[in-house]
Amino acid sequence: MDDLEVTQLSPAFGVEVVGFDPADPLDDATRQLLQELFDDHGLLLFRDLELSHAEQVRLCKMLIRKEGLEDGDAGPEIEDNFYISNKRPDSAVPFGRLQFHSDTMWADQPFEVLSLYAIDVEAPVVPTTFVSAAYAWTTLPAELRARVDGLEVLQTAGEVRRGDLTDVVVTTVERPPTTVTRIAHRHPRTGQTILYICEQMTKEIVGCSPDDSERLLDELFDHLYDPANQWSHPWRNGDLIVWDNIAIQHARQNVRTDGPARTLRKVATPIPQLSFDQLPSYSTAD
Ligand SMILES: [Fe+2]
């Protein structure tokens, strides 16, 4: 493959990679470069790609060094049927605003990698906004680090209501899965420490009163979601973003079903094991 051009997208995380053709055979040097970029920066943007579903799956698995992962272990990637869209029938989250989160953060082993490929978007498209929870940990003031030392939080797929809930999508789950994780979470692949809380799914700090829990979480959210640390991407057809779902969180402003087309093909892997009554459905908060 020809030399790739790499440009930093924000001071905190993310790079754009120019010159990558998913149809070309992947040589060892390119594979290693892309894996290292992914580990170091957490998010890769490629533009103007012609990308099949199979190529999207292959790239996602390669970046987390799981090229041998069987399709049977990988859930939604098996078929080309997983879309975030306000136009396409039977798509996920067709409307509403999404608060910051990592997908399936309430699972013991959440998705390691997420990707969205823009197949049909019309301007003005609602961007996807990202923040780095890895960067947030490295920049967390020492006083706050000391206060969260050893603390754990309850992550839930059930309802969490906090902040401005206008247009926010809430998920409804019959039997919501939960997990308990450390606030200073060790990333399973990179070993980085992650500020592992999110406004959408982190219910409470274990062993704290509700008021103390919410006060400390608010201080941490103020740092994590500092607008200076956010990066937004207004989609164009042919854009692919692949990101580390544990280190990087995503959000979006309100999407309307009667607004411009916004259809993104999603590949997420590996999928946590869930039963049917643990799969969410979506509605708005108000
Ligand atoms: Fe998501």
Image (cartoon, grey):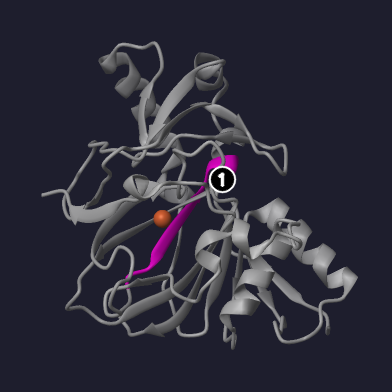
The question of residue 132 being in magenta is answered with: yes
Where residue 176 sits, quadrant-wise, is top left
From the viewer's perspective, is 229 left or right of 39?
A: left
Vertical side of 281 occupied by 211: above or below: above
Seen at 58% across and 65% down, the residue is 242
Look at the image and tell me in which quarter the N terminus lies: bottom right
- Amino acid type at circle 1 is Ile
Give the residue pinned by disc 1: 246
**Residue at the location (89% across, 69% down)?**
29
User: In terms of depth relative to the viewer, which is nearer, 23 or 175?
Assistant: 175
Give the quadrant of residue 47.
bottom right
Q: Could you tell me residue 141's position as x and y percent?
A: 54, 26
Q: Residue furthest right?
A: 28
Task: Mark 1 and ligand 1: say if the CB distance to the nearest ligand atom is below 8 Å.
Answer: no
Image position, residue 253 (x, y; %): 29, 60
Q: Which residues make up the magenta segment? A: 126-135
